[in-house]
Amino acid sequence: MKPRTLLRIGTAAAALTAVQAAPVISTFGPLRNRLMPRLAGTGRPDHVALTFDDGPDPFSTPHFLTILQKYDVQATFFLLGSMADKSPGLVREIADAGHEIAVHGWAHRPLLLRGPRATYQDLRRARDTITDLTGRAPQWFRPPYGVMTTAAHLSARRLGLTPVLWTSWGEDWTSRATADSVHRTVTADLHGGGTILLHDSDCTSAPAAWQSALGALPTLLDHCAAKGWQVGPLRDHGLPNTPGRPTPGTEAA
């Protein structure tokens, strides 16, 4: 193969990689919150969306459900399809309690390392599993690690899913996290219209890291109440709806 041809192939490959990776810029919270409020999950100013990632986990998720029931608060749970498949009864319990269920992908792997076909298949498998278990197609999608790609945006649109990240998180996945540190970290960036990210499972975190989020949850709910903010799921947050249900015939892998 001629050097000029190799150069063209290399240039084309680099361009494709750049296109795929371009949305990664949304991973940077301050920039996302300022320039991409819709993707960040900025909603109506009198409301805070409460979201959880990485469940369902039979060892930890029920503890979160108990506190949410005590406070009469509903939330959005971004479930991993692989975890949902292992605990179908817990998925139904979450849905029956009135919480909103959304897609966190099938496997907790960075989408930046996956091509368009693998990305689409991952999201579709998770969406279909959740739909089968709950009888309702999920509306929202959040990628593992919050890393969006062009393939993730296109796949989500084909599947009728709206990507939503967060405006504040608890950094509750480390072994150093405590209830106090989670509370401080969340409230430092929290405002009316914000979306909180916590984790109700340690399947991708330090062992028992979820206990820091669980310990912080009551104080966070009290904080929001003191500020006069309603707390609830994304469906009540005033965000734009999904881009429409998939057009028949467009979902073929």
Image (cartoon, rainbow, N blue to C red):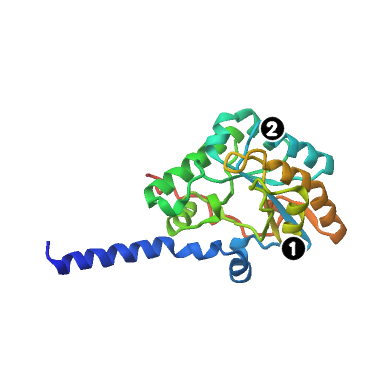
Mark 1, Cα crowd under 10 Å, few <14 / some 14-19 / many 20+, is: few
Residue visible at 56% across and 51% down?
A: 142
Left or right: residue 92 versus residue 104 is right
The residue sitting at the front extreme is 176
Q: Position of residue 24 (x, y in %)?
A: 49, 62
Residue at the disc numbered 2: 93
Residue visible at 58% across and 45% down?
A: 138
Camera-side mark, 1 or 2 = 1
Closer to the camera in the image, 249 or 16: 16
Residue visible at 12% across and 65% down?
A: 2
Residue at the disc numbered 1: 188
Residue visible at 71% across and 54% down?
A: 49
> Of the numbered discs in the image, which one, if any, rests on residue 24?
none
Q: Is residue 243 above or below residue 135?
A: below
Q: Quadrant of the C terminus?
A: top left
Circle 1: residue type: Ala
Q: Quadrant of the N terminus?
A: bottom left
Distance of label 1 from label 2 (alpha carbons): 32 Å
Circle 2: residue type: Glu
Q: Position of residue 52 (x, y in %)?
A: 66, 46
The residue sitting at the right extreme is 226
Q: Position of residue 245 (x, y in %)?
A: 52, 50
